[in-house]
Image (cartoon, helix red, strand yellow):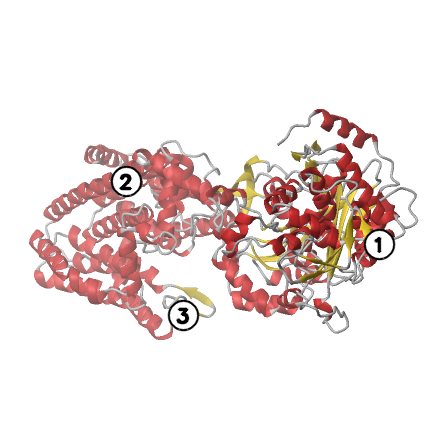
């Protein structure tokens, strides 16, 4: 080997090298020490912290939505069901180019502009790695098209979800109500506990029983501790706390009776409420026109909503609990009882009805609806059967308005009935105090004349009229009206709100009067009992929609259809052992006896012939033992 | 730790002269080094199997790379050291030419040009320079008096600077620094005066601010900032470090068990089978496993230092010393980077990380070590 050995000293060289290497070794040892110290720090000193971090990384708590409780009618017919619906969802983290993916999806399924905009809005408030729905209710064909093209769209998936389905459509829209997507407004009202309960749930009861029994139907959210990888894919379930499904509701409502009531009302606007006299259970609850609640479940389209909200017939308006109408002459039985109890009239009291009434010191003429009057000697029975206004005016003039108010209150007028439905209106029965407070005016004698006939300030909902009628049929036992009969099979107790003590003779007289309305030849409500082999008691009513100028003649032709009087009819049957009380309101139907009474008749024909079941009897005996005034 | 060990082995080596020449000697194989490398290679395959999520494809391909690399090592070991010394200028100049070629015609990804494509074969000239630079510096110094004069030092620095500058332009700061380090180690071991080393260190401190301001690219500055505060950007640039630290830390002393590491098995650890593979080992085997691996590395380094001590001539001594120290720097930089001590610069863990190119260069380096270690036998024959 040729080497340059000039000026080189191998031993010095080697010593120099070794010294240098020894210094380097010290450096290597020092750096190794740094590494070992680093591992000691990470793996021993901070072990707990990193252990937690690593668990946080891999374990995610996922909520498991409970299934919503079902709603049945009293015979077990399913009114609100849960059905699988297929949604198209996207996990943002798994999509490379969102716009391109959205366009591709748009070629495969029908996407409205609203869908994409709503999707982008949802995208902003979701949790990481959470599938965000883009389209709901995919058709079979759309599902097929997506699955075929799945490989081209990572992050896009079809997910099954249980959604509400209302099998009987519009028939129960105003009673059962509907659920809808949880909105920003719902969220802003949520308590911390609500936020917890609704994890994993996308819909909430919006109206009707779905709303008032929301917490019962919802159930309890469950949890899953799942192990996920960095791409958010669930690898396995480590621990699971099952959700508690919502409780099932069985209603007092009867689907057949409901159908009968709805058919009887036909295309007219109005409401029908039927109540089980012995429990306060609501047997039929119709508000017309109605709508298809299924439209709302996964989010109603703008066009559909516009059609419903802009309609002059206001189908979304729940006339049975929100509609406040002057009850008109349907108050006469109640007022008659009040007059009897107050000692203003007796069975023998007779008055002369010339067709008008005149207060002393007042030139104004109060005209009876029958211009020529009801005759020389009108007693209470006749006054009810023929709906003689003068008889009641005469009585009202002698009656204190506050006494009248208290009597009405016993029957539930002027305050909410307490039914288990949301958004109930209270109606109004005026008193001296009320008028001073609300109107700043004293009570005039003329006000009493209006009040006794259910006009003027008096307003009542169809439900209140049904409750009033049931209370009369019960001879004073006033039940809280109730939609729900059992929750998860547990009977909901009937609740007596009030027991009115009145003389049995007076009750008999009121019954007689109401019976006469339906059964006497001159009765205004004959059509309510037509061809029935049991006896019906009722009272017709007509409620003025617009005031009629003094002396002017009522001319229905000249008025717009919507200014015509509302037709009302309340009734119960059978008279000897009342089982069902019905209130019928037909908007602008003009004649209570002619238009509303036949509707009530259809309900009686359907309901009364049914055997009084053992269950009902058992309940009745239990209730009669447990009566106490709530 | 090692010096007494060396003197002990020294006498052994002398004693072996009298013994019959073993097969290993004849084949220019350093048995202790080979055994250590084989153990490391097996550990590497085992960790890789776990890091790749049980994908045998990775393990199979890496096994093939290892066979090629070990074969390369044997071939490199057969070549006389003098051949390397005489040819190192040509290798060095050729390497520089290739680096210029990379800048002119190179291909690459993510804004960096690091590869040359010749006849469909893609390779990275900077890999060649990992051995070419220390070889050239050693050959250059070998012909000059020790300790090196100022002129010699300037010459050596120039030899280091040219390829380093070319690689920085690719840009590949990490490789450039490692290659420069390998050349500087040779210069240091040759006896570069402490005054000069001190002056250089001072210069570095003084120029730190200008380098930060003008010498680094944005992403490089970002990496250093991320290092200082990884929590600031947990889901961005800090993601790797955050998760590798969680993996290592959660391994504790005893580890979660082989194939049981949640961070690595659930893909929270990016590049778990390449640069961040030690996090997998640390998570599954705990600190015990880490210390065992470090021990293996220390033994390899100790053997390399021993070989450099035994070398007959300056060229072999400097080359072996430089290769050994550079090997340690690789280990240190990789582990420092994964544990969050150093910025993420993309240095694989020697022999353990998945990848063929770096493995082949590395094993060629060990081939040269073996050639140095068995040089004396060649001289006698």
The residue that mark 3 highlights is B107
The reply to the same-chain question for discs 3 and 2 is no
Secondary structure beneath disc 2?
helix
* Front one among A340 and B100: A340
Q: Nearer the viewer, mark 1 or mark 2?
A: 1
Answer left or right for B60 relative to A490.
Answer: left
* Front one among A172 and A582: A582
Answer left or right for A301 relative to B251.
Answer: right
The reply to the same-chain question for discs 1 and 2 is yes
The reply to the same-chain question for discs 3 and 1 is no
- Measured as percent of width and height from the top left, residue A510 is found at 77, 41
- Measured as percent of width and height from the top left, residue A373 is found at 79, 58
- Measured as percent of width and height from the top left, residue A207 is found at 62, 51
The residue that mark 2 highlights is A38
Secondary structure beneath disc 1?
helix
The residue that mark 1 highlights is A598
Q: Write the residue at 25% across / 61% down.
A: B86
Disc sitting over residue A220 in the figure: none
- Measured as percent of width and height from the top left, residue B255 is found at 41, 34
Would you say residue A211 is visible in this rendering? yes
> Separation of disc 1 and disc 2 at Cα?
92 Å
Secondary structure beneath disc 3?
loop
Disc 1 residue crowd, few under 14, some 14–19, many 20+, Cα 10 Å: many
Q: Nearer the viewer, mark 3 or mark 2?
A: 2
């Amino acid at each position: 080997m040729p080497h340059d050995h000039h000026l080189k000293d191998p031993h010095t060289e080697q010593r120099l090298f070794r010294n240098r290497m020894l210094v380097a070794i010290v450096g290597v040892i020092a750096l190794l020490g740094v590494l070992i110290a680093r591992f000691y720090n990470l793996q021993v000193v901070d072990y707990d912290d990193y252990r937690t971090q690593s668990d946080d990384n891999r374990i995610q708590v996922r909520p498991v939505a409970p299934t919503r409780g079902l709603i049945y009618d009293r015979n077990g017919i399913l009114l609100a069901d849960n059905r699988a619906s297929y949604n198209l969802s996207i996990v943002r983290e798994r999509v490379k180019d969102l716009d391109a993916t959205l366009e591709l999806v748009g070629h495969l399924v029908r996407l409205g502009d609203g869908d994409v905009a709503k999707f982008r809005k949802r995208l902003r408030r979701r949790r990481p790695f959470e599938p965000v729905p883009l389209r709901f209710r995919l058709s079979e064909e759309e599902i097929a098209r997506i699955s075929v093209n799945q490989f081209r769209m990572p992050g896009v998936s079809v997910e099954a979800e249980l959604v509400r389905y209302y099998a009987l459509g519009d028939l129960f829209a105003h009673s059962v109500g509907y659920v809808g997507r949880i909105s920003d407004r719902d969220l802003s009202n949520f308590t911390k506990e609500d936020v917890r309960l609704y994890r994993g749930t996308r819909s909430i009861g919006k109206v009707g029983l779905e709303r008032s029994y929301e917490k019962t139907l919802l159930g309890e959210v469950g949890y899953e501790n799942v192990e996920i990888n960095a791409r958010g894919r669930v690898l396995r379930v480590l621990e699971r706390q099952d959700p508690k499904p919502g409780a099932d509701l069985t209603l007092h409502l009867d689907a057949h009776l409901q159908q009968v009531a709805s058919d009887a009302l036909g295309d007219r606007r109005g409401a029908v409420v039927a109540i089980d006299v012995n429990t306060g259970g609501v047997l039929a609850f119709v508000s017309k026109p109605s709508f298809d609640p299924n439209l709302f479940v996964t989010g109603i389209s703008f066009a559909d909503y516009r059609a419903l909200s802009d309609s002059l017939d206001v189908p979304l308006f729940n006339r049975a609990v929100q509609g406040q109408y002057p009850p008109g002459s349907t108050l006469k039985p109640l007022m008659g009882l009040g007059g009897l109890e107050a000692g203003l009239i007796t069975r023998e009291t007779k008055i002369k009805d010339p067709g008008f009434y005149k207060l002393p010191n007042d030139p104004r003429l109060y005209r009876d609806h029958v211009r020529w009057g009801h005759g020389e000697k009108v007693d209470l029975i006749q006054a009810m059967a023929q709906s003689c206004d003068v008889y009641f005016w005469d009585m009202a003039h002698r009656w204190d308005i506050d006494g009248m108010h208290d009597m009405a209150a016993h029957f539930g007028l002027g305050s909410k009935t307490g039914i288990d439905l949301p958004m109930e209106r209270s109606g109004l029965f005026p008193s001296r105090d009320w008028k001073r407070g609300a109107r700043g005016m004293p009570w005039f004698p003329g006000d009493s004349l209006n009040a006794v006939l259910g006009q003027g300030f008096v307003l009542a909902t169809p439900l209140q009229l049904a409750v009033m009628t049931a209370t009369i049929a019960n001879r004073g036992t006033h039940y809280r009206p109730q939609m729900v009969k059992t929750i998860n099979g547990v009977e909901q107790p009937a609740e007596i709100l009030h027991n009115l003590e009145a003389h049995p003779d007076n009750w008999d007289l009121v019954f007689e009067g109401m019976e006469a309305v339906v059964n006497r030849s001159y009765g205004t409500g004959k059509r309510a009992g037509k061809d029935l082999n049991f006896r019906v008691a009722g009272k017709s009513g007509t409620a003025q929609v617009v005031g009629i100028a003094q002396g002017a003649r009522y001319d229905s032709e000249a008025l717009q259809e919507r200014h015509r009087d509302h037709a009302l009819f309340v009734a119960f049957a059978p008279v000897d052992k009342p089982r069902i009380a019905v209130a019928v309101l037909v908007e602008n139907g003009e004649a209570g006896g002619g238009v509303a009474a036949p509707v009530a008749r259809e309900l009686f024909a359907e309901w009364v012939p049914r055997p009084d079941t053992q269950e009902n009897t058992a309940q009745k005996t239990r209730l009669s033992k447990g009566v106490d005034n709530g | 730790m090692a010096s007494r060990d060396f003197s002990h082995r020294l006498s052994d080596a002398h004693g072996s002269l009298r013994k019959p020449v073993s097969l290993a000697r004849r084949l220019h194989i350093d048995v202790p080094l080979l055994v250590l490398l084989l153990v490391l290679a097996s550990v590497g395959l085992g960790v890789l199997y776990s890091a790749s999520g049980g994908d045998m494809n990775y393990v199979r391909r890496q096994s093939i790379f290892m066979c090629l690399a070990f074969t390369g090592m044997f071939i490199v070991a057969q070549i006389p050291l003098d051949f390397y010394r005489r040819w190192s200028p040509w290798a060095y100049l050729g390497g520089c030419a290739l680096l210029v070629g990379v800048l002119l015609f190179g291909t690459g990804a993510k804004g960096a040009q690091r590869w040359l494509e010749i006849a469909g074969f893609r390779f990275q000239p900077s890999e060649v320079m990992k051995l070419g630079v220390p070889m050239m510096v050693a050959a250059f110094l070998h012909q000059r008096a020790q300790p090196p004069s100022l002129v010699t030092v300037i010459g050596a620095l120039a030899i280091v600077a040219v390829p380093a500058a070319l690689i920085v332009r690719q840009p590949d700061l990490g490789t450039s620094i490692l290659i420069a380090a390998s050349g500087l180690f040779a210069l240091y071991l040759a006896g570069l005066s402490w005054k000069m080393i001190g002056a250089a260190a001072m210069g570095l401190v003084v120029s730190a601010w200008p380098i930060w301001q003008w010498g680094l690219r944005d992403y490089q500055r970002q990496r250093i900032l991320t290092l200082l505060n990884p929590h600031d950007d947990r889901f961005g640039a800090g993601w790797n470090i955050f998760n590798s630290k969680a993996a290592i830390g959660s391994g504790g002393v005893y580890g979660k068990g082989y194939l049981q590491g949640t961070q690595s098995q659930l893909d929270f650890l990016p590049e778990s089978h390449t640069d961040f593979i030690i996090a997998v080992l640390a998570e599954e085997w705990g600190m015990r496993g880490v210390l065992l691996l470090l021990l293996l590395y220390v033994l390899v380094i100790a053997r390399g230092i021993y070989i450099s001590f035994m070398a007959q001539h300056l060229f072999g001594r400097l080359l072996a010393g430089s290769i050994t120290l550079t090997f340690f720097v690789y280990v240190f930089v990789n582990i420092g980077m994964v544990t969050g001590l150093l910025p993420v610069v993309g240095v694989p863990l020697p022999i353990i990380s998945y990848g063929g190119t770096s493995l082949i260069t590395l094993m060629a380096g060990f081939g040269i070590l073996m050639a140095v270690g068995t040089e004396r036998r060649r001289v006698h024959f």
